[in-house]
Amino acid sequence: ALRAAPQFGYVLYKMGKLLSKQGNYAEAEARFEEALNLDPDNQDLYYLIGCDLAAQDRETEAQRYFERALELNPDDARAHNDLALLIGSRDPEKAISHFERALQIAPAFTLALNNWGNLLAELERYEEAEQKYRTALELREEDEYAWYNLARLAERRGNLEEAERYYLSAMENSPENSHIPNNLGLLYASLGRGDDAEQMYQKAIEIDAENPLPWNNLGQLSETKGDLETAL
């Protein structure tokens, strides 16, 4: 009776996801296959399994699952976005076509705009990248990812004062993200503003003491200052 229940495919998927997290990939794959055998036209299961495989850097397999999910439902904006992320470095133009489709389906999908902008930045198409981030902010002014991405883009282009303003806006909208003050600290360090950099690294550590990056950067800063005891 349990196996006949429509939701049992999701139970098997969750079992597979847990096994995958434990590194038991063969057993996880078996659970995924059982889930799909039970419910072979469940588009959501193909999408979820694709996400799990992508998180393991199993790109070829993940791509196959995302493409099957889109065969079953061509209007799944999430699947278009995640497939674009997966193939962006290998086939940027195809990835861009998936970002375009995602936004045709869901025009307010700010995550897709940010991801598209990041791909354009990697391609050094900076003005187009900036336009994507600003469109995301027009849709959602408090979008911390767009502010953060604008900051990184400004750094790439050598506009460091702009980058500082954008990082501060990102921090204001996402005060629990330790990566933002850490990156701002790196910016301050590059400008020779050691005290400001130290303050940002300390702030990042207060937010997330398990993040090794600000600890490492704080140590390097202390070493630069000649404070070897703190650096150690």
Image: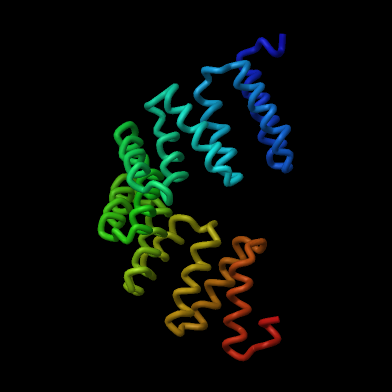
In this view, the residue in front, 185 or 8, is: 8
Q: Within the image, what quadrant is residue 153 found in?
A: bottom left
Residue occupying the point 52% across, 26% down:
44
Quarter of the picture containing the N terminus is top right
Q: Within the image, what quadrant is residue 99 found in?
A: top left
Residue occupying the point 32% across, 69% down:
157
Which colour style is shown?
Answer: rainbow
Above-or-below relation of 121 to 154: above
- Residue 221's x, y, as percent? 57, 81
In this view, the residue in front, 3 or 123, is: 123
Above-or-below relation of 220 to 26: below
- Residue 83's x, y, as percent? 44, 39
Quarter of the picture containing the C terminus is bottom right
Residue occupying the point 42% across, 53% down:
145
Residue occupying the point 32% across, 37% down:
103
Question: As drawn, is 51 to the left or to the right of 113?
Answer: right
Question: As drawn, is 31 to the left or to the right of 140?
Answer: right
- Residue 123's x, y, as percent? 34, 57
In this view, the residue in front, 82 or 174, is: 82
Above-or-below relation of 161 to 65: below
- Residue 196's x, y, as percent? 49, 78
Q: Which residue lies furthest to the bottom in this view?
A: 226
